[in-house]
Image: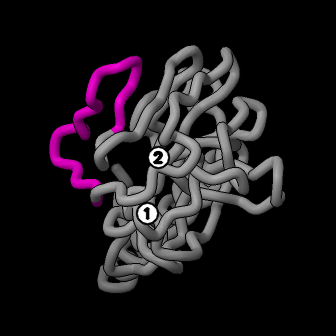
Amino acid sequence: MGTGYEESIILKIVNRVVEAVAVIAFAWFLVYCFGSEVRCTGQSMQPVIEDGDGLLVDRAGFRLAGPGRYDIAVFRSSVTGNVNIKRIIGLPGETVLISGGVVYIDGEALDPPPGAEFSDISLAGLAETPVELSENEYFVLGDNRDASEDSRFESVGNVKASDLEGKAWFRISPFERIGAVR
């Protein structure tokens, strides 16, 4: 009786390991078929995203639901070709202005979302005068405003919808910071 019981326990353990491997493989398949991975370089999105963080990018959901204000967008600069990670602030058809360190959308001061903290803006750049977004353009800013090259500068400018690759939604590295990105 001892041998059959031991075989039953070993079989259960092997089944659990196979199930875990299958779930992980399926999750990996979903993530990489409908998303991608990107690594953050620089301090422009601190404290939410740190230099060197590995992020999963939701491409499918982003395309279906569309970009929204405060989404953390991953896009390829049409000027430099570099991959960037910034927060969407201005939406198509809106007018963005930065005055006195405050972002104005269509003439009204923009409040950060609940729980978010953005650094003050000491340089308005191109948004020192009103920036009108066309029907396929977005205005993006880094959370660490004084250390971010974003829509305020000609090297990035307004981001075209076609340049948006997806929404950063989950940090996969470093291990101690794994979790959702907001």
Mark 1, other Cα within 10 Å: few <14 / some 14–19 / many ≥20: many
Identify the element where label 2 is drawn.
strand
| Residue 20 against residue 58 in the figure, above or below | below
Q: Position of residue 68 (x, y in %)?
A: 47, 28
Q: Position of residue 56 (x, y in %)?
A: 55, 57
| Residue 81 against residue 109 in the figure, above or below | below
The residue pinned by badge 1 equals 45
| Residue 139 against residue 141 in the figure, above or below | above
Magenta-colored stretch includes residue 69: no
Q: Residue at x 54, y 76 (%)?
A: 42
Q: Residue at x 61, y 50 (%)?
A: 74
Separation of residues labelled 2 and 1 (CA atoms): 8 Å
| Residue type (three-letter) at the residue carrying disc 1 | Met
The residue pinned by badge 2 equals 87
Q: Position of residue 50 (x, y in %)?
A: 42, 74
Which stretch appears magenta?
103-119
Magenta-colored stretch includes residue 117: yes
Determine if residue 29 is in view: no
Which label number is shown at residue 156?
Answer: none
